[in-house]
Amino acid sequence: MKPGTGIMAALSPSEVPLLPADAEARIRIPDSDMVINVVGQHDAHIRLLEAAYTDTRIIGRGDELVVSGPPESVAKAQKAVDELILLLLDGQQIDEDRVQRVIDMVNSNVPSPSDVLIGGIPVARGRLIRPKTLGQRAYMNAINENTVVFGIGPAGTGKTYLGMAAAVEALRSGAVRRILLTRPAVEAGERLGFLPGDLAAKVDPYLRPLYDALYDMLGPDETVSLMEKGVIEIAPLAYMRGRTLNDAYIILDEAQNTSPEQMKMFLTRLGFNSKMVVTGDVTQVDLPDGKASGLRRVRKILTGIEGVAFIELSSKDVVRARIVADIVDAYERHERLDAEGERS
């Protein structure tokens, strides 16, 4: 059921006292069991809506919410509640994070936040990995529709995690026979040679985020079993040289730390019935000073090629603690000011 087809009905006048310039809307919640999910424990979701939409008042009456206040704020609150109801009708649970994301999208004039948040990638144990932002939805769509996809953006935007979910789904559906996960083993302030152990032990910390994502989606036992069978392979980028990768889902993580030569080498490993996802953050390059990043250069080279897509994610797509988005924004502002100072 979409907005305007029966979920909401605007009424005036109302039992709620209104200022002369106020508007009012009544929103009927189609299932009484949904009421607590819409309003939240101790009205937590209502408080978020009232804080987001200035001077609105939201009062619950049975299976209805009465929203009053300035017309623009009422319309946006009405839209946000309607989208939350659509998510509940889809069988999703609503928490404060989900409410805030719907509010953010309504405020950004996203036509249908529920369309962004409904659906996902099925992985193990009946789980669905769902997009949480408009950028993540665009990224997932690009992965479905293209052979090579570059997900570029700051930490916490789900670049690697969503790519891994798509790889697991492709393996389980039989679309590919194996998954290959790789990263360049580039030091971020530490020296690889000082780490203890043999080569495998030295590169393990660089690959640990990939293991963590697999454990989360498949569980440790299945992950280890698939790795022992060679169905899932995790290796440093240097190990890709000279190979042709057929029937495979290949993910290159931390691609900002590849050289242009390494990027070309990796991309030309692509074989028949295979797909590549390349992820990275061009603001966190750990290469030695003066060495070009293959991720920065590849966009100029491959833009316009059919089957290749570039998706830019931003602080708006950060799905970790909200302070992470603020940190990303603060660094971007600082870097812009530094760049302007250098030019002046």
Image (cartoon, grey):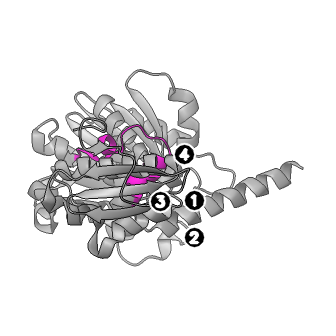
Residue 208 in sight from this viewpoint:
no
Q: Are marks 1 and 2 in contact (CB under 8 Å)?
A: yes
User: Relative to 113, is 285 above or below?
Assistant: below
**Is residue 328 toward the left or the right of residue 254 in the image?**
right
Q: CA distance from mark 1 to mark 4?
A: 11 Å
Q: Nearer the viewer, mark 3 or mark 1?
A: 3
Among the two numbered marks 3 and 1 on one chain, the one whose residue lies closer to the N terminus: 3
Q: Amino acid at mark 4?
A: Ser
Q: CA distance from mark 2 to mark 3?
A: 50 Å
- Asked whether disc 3 touches disc 4, contact meaning CB atoms under 8 Å apart, the reply is no
Q: Which mark is residue 189?
A: 2
Residue lying farthest to the right in this orientation? 344
Q: CA distance from mark 2 to mark 4?
A: 18 Å
Nearest to N terminus: mark 1 or mark 4:
4
Q: Which residue is mark 3?
A: 56
Determine whether the residue tagged by mark 1 lies in a helix, strand or loop.
loop
Which residue position is annotated with label 1? 286
Please tell me whether residue 107 belongs to the stretch shown in magenta: yes
First reached walking from the N terminus: tag 1 or tag 2: 2
Question: Height in image: 98 above or below 270?
Answer: below
Per the model, the C-alpha gap separating discs 3 and 4 is: 54 Å
Instruction: Describe the element under mark 4 as helix, strand or loop.
Output: loop
**Image depth: mark 1 or mark 4 in front:** 1
Q: Secondary structure at mark 2?
A: loop
Residue 159 highlighted magenta (yes or no): no
The residue that mark 4 highlights is 259
